[in-house]
């Protein structure tokens, strides 16, 4: 039984590392800001200036998107696409720096 639990935990950790969509519509704004602060810039660009509001810390991204007339699924997709692009750019820049040394 313990071996199976360890395998399950290891598998979940590997899936989390491989996950290229770090933001979901079920996450609270607080979770989003803790997990990836770069998402704040995108949310502000969408007119979601309420992310700093104490009440918004309890709301999910889906709640906020609906309140602002946005499609939550499309918003999550856009956020994750932009975050993935930024991550790829960071990796490329690190690789370029290593090659220069």
Image: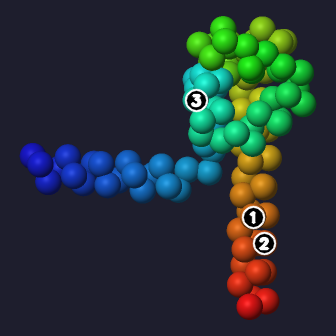
Q: Name the residue under label 2.
A: 93
Is residue 74 visible in the rendered structure shown here? no
Is residue 37 visible in the rendered structure shown here? yes
Q: Residue at x 20, y 46 (%)?
A: 5
Work out whether mark 3 precedes mark 1 in sequence or the reverse, and give the earlier one.
Answer: 3
**Percent from the top left, x then y, of residue 67?**
78, 8
Q: Nearer the viewer, residue 3 or 89?
A: 89
Q: Nearer the viewer, residue 45 or 16?
A: 45
Task: Tell me where residue 10 sits by quadrant.
Answer: bottom left
Q: Which residue is drawn at 85% across and 28% down?
A: 44
Residue contact at pointers 2 and 1, CB within 8 angstroms: yes
In the image, taking residue 86 as reference, residue 60 lies left or right, namely left
**Percent from the top left, x then y, of residue 100?**
79, 89
**Percent from the top left, x then y, of residue 63?**
68, 13
Q: Name the residue under label 3.
A: 31
Badge 1 element: helix
Vertical relation: 65 (above or below) 5: above
The outermost residue toward the left is 1
Q: Mark 1 points at which residue?
A: 90
Q: Which of 8 and 28 is in front in this view?
A: 28
Badge 3 element: helix
At label 1, counting other C-alpha atoms closer than 10 Å, the crowd grade (few under 14, some 14-19, many 20 or more) is few
How far apart are the two marked residues, 2 and 3, measured between alpha carbons? 28 Å
Task: Tell me where residue 66 sits by quadrant.
Answer: top right
How far apart are the two marked residues, 2 and 1, measured between alpha carbons? 5 Å
At label 2, counting other C-alpha atoms closer than 10 Å, the crowd grade (few under 14, some 14-19, many 20 or more) is few
Vertical relation: 14 (above or below) 82: below
């Amino acid at each position: 039984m313990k071996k199976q639990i360890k395998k399950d935990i290891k598998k979940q950790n590997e899936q989390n590392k491989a996950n290229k969509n770090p933001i979901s519509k079920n996450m609270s704004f607080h979770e989003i800001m803790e997990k990836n602060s770069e998402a704040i810039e995108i949310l502000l660009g969408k007119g979601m200036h309420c992310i700093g509001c104490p009440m918004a810390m309890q709301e999910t991204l889906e709640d906020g998107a609906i309140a602002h007339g946005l499609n939550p699924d499309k918003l999550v997709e856009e956020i994750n696409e932009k975050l993935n692009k930024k991550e790829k750019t960071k990796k490329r820049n690190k690789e370029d720096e290593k090659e220069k040394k």
